[in-house]
Image: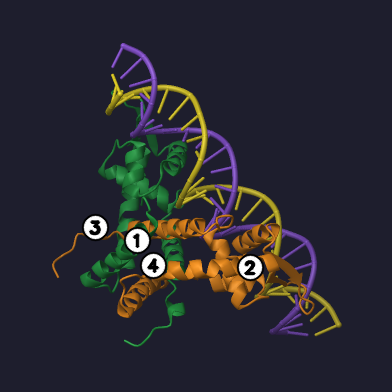
Chain colours: A orange, B green, C purple, D yellow
Amino acid sequence: MKEINKKQFNLGFELGLTVSAYRAAGQKSLKLNGLEDITKEQFGILILLTMRDGLYQTQIANILGKDRPNITRMIDILETKGYIRREKDSSNRRILKVFLTEKGQEKAEIAKPVRDKFSEVQYRGFSNEDIVTLVSLLRRVRNNFKEEYNLEI
Amino acid sequence: MKEINKKQFNLGFELGLTVSAYRAAGQKSLKLNGLEDITKEQFGILILLTMRDGLYQTQIANILGKDRPNITRMIDILETKGYIRREKDSSNRRILKVFLTEKGQEKAEIAKPVRDKFSEVQYRGFSNEDIVTLVSLLRRVRNNFKEEYNLEI
DNA sequence: TAATAATTGTTATCATAATAACAGTTTGAG
DNA sequence: CTCAAACTGTTATTATGATAACAATTATTA
C-alpha cells in the first residue's frame, strides 16, 4: 500500500464521531420505543442487573468500565426514578447491593429487544472476521497507550 | 470463522475503553511535557488555529466535529487563559473570528511535537493497511447508525 | 420592500468522564 | 491485638457532550 495521508485517518476524530453516533443512535432507539426517560448508560446498569441482580456498586463500575463516582450518580438517578433499590450487605457494612425493583424489571424487559436491535444494527454488513478485526485493532490502540503512558485502564 | 461470542465483542464497551485510554493518554502526554494547564480538546483548537488562524467559531466546531455551545465554552477558557482572542468580523456582524495570541502560538509550538509523538504511539505496530481498516470499520459502524436512525452526524 | 427563514454565538440545563478527598469499614502485617 | 493500609461509597469540582431556546444579524422569498 502506498503512503497514506495521516490527516484522513485521525483516530481521535474518528473515535469521537463514532462515539457520538453510537450515543445518538442509542438514545434515538430508546426514544423510538418510548424509553427516553433514562439514558443509554443507565440502561446498561438495568440490563446488567437482569443478568446479575444484587451486584454491589464497585462491581457494577468494574463490569461496565466506569468509575465509582459515576456509578453512584447514575444509581442515584435510577433509585429516584424507582427502577432500582440499594440494600445494605449484612456481612460487609461497606457494601451496598443493588437490586432491580419490579418497575425496573419491567423496564429492562422492554429495553432488551431494543438493545438487541441496536446490537444488530451496529454490525450490519459485518462478517465475524470484521467484528474481530475491529475490536482487536481497538485493543491494540489501547495497548499502545497503556505501554507508552503506563495507564491503569 | 466459527460463531463468535458477541459478548466478547461488545462495541460500546470497547469504544468506551478506547476513548478513555485515548483521553487519559492524551492528558498524560501533556502532563509529561508540562502542558497540563489546558486539556487535550483545548489543544485541538490551538493546533487547528496554527494551521488556519482566524477561523470563526462555527467553522472550528464543524472541523473538530463538536457543537457550537461546546466550542463557545472551550474558547471562553482559552481566552481567559490568554491563548486566543476573538475579533469581530466587519463584513458579517454575527461572526467572531478566533486568533491565536503570541502566548497561544508559543503554546501550540510546544504542543506540536507532543501531539506528533502521541500520533506515533497510537498507531505503533500498525501497518498502513491496519490504519485504513480500523478507520473504515469505524466509518461503517457510523454509517449503519446513520442509515437506521437517520442521524445528522 | 416586507415578512420569513436561516445563521451565529450564547446561555441554560442535564448527563457523563475523571480526579481528589473524605468517613466508615475491613483487612492484614507486625 | 493494634495500627496502618486498603476498600466502599460518597461528595465536590472541573471539563466535555448534547439539546433547547434566545437575541442579533443576514439571507431569502413572496
Image quadrant where residue A100 sits = bottom right
Give the CA distance from mark 4 to mark 1: 10 Å
Residue tagged by mark 4?
A: A121
Measure the C-alpha gap from mark 4 to mark 3.
Answer: 25 Å
Q: CA distance from mark 3 to mark 1?
A: 16 Å
Residue named by callout 1: B142
Residue under the image location 58 percent in, 62 percent down: A42
- Do the residues at pointers 3 and 1 share their chain? no
Chain designation of label 1: B
Gap between marks 2 and 3 measured at Cα: 45 Å
State the CA–CA distance, disc 2 to disc 1: 30 Å
Q: Chain of mark 4?
A: A
Question: Which numbered mark, 4 or 1, is in the foreground of this view?
Answer: 4
| Residue highlighted by disc 2 | A106
Answer yes or no: do the residues labelled 4 and 3 have beta carbons within 8 Å? Answer: no
Mark 1 crowd level (few <14, some 14–19, many ≥20, 10 Å Cα): many
Name the disc covering residue A8, or none.
Answer: 3
The percent position of residue D25, horizontal first and vertical second, equals 36, 23
| Circle on res. B76 | none
Camera-side mark, 2 or 3: 2
**Residue kind at label 1, given as amino acid type:** Arg
Q: Amino acid at mark 3?
A: Gln
Residue at image point 21% right, 69% down: B128
